[in-house]
Amino acid sequence: MKRTEFSAWEVELMVDMQSCRIQQRSKAETLKRYQKMAVRAIEMGATSPPKLSEFLAASYRKRKSTALPEETLS
């Protein structure tokens, strides 16, 4: 069975996923973490899952905030 009709949020999500660049070596793990977060968001009442680009941006900000300042690396 093929789907030929999609909701606007589904199309937006697919286009967003196509535009995101994820390193091949971490793609599977990144998508697993995104899926877990998206399911959690839906369970908490969201009408559509957050975009992958938003998830990646939040992950990047989180990594940057937990990184050591350069002075402590010397």
Image: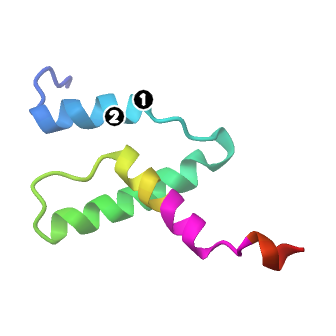
30 sits to left or right of 54: right
Q: Is residue 47 magenta?
A: no
Q: Which residues are magenta?
A: 60-69
Q: Quadrant of the C terminus?
A: bottom right
- x, y percentage for residue 51? 30, 46
How packed mark 2 is, by other alpha carbons closer than 10 Å (few <14, some 14-19, many 20 or more), is: some
Q: Which mark is residue 16?
A: 2
CB under 8 Å between discs 2 and 1:
yes
Viewer-side residue, 53 vs 8: 53
Q: Which residue is mark 1?
A: 19
**Which quarter of the picture shows residue 42?**
bottom left
- What percent of the width, then of the height, locates residue 6? 12, 29
Dominant secondary structure of the magenta stretch? helix
In this rendered view, identify the residue nearer to me: 22 or 64: 64
In the shown orientation, is residue 70 left or right of residue 13? Answer: right
Identity of the residue drawn at 36% across and 50% down: 54
Colouring scheme applied when the structure was drawn:
rainbow
Q: Secondary structure at mark 1?
A: helix
Q: Which residue occupies the foreground of this view, 52 or 24?
A: 52
Q: How many marks?
A: 2
- Please, is residue 50 above or below residue 9 in the view? below
Dividing the picture into quadrants, the one containing residue 4 is: top left
Q: Amino acid at mark 2?
A: Asp
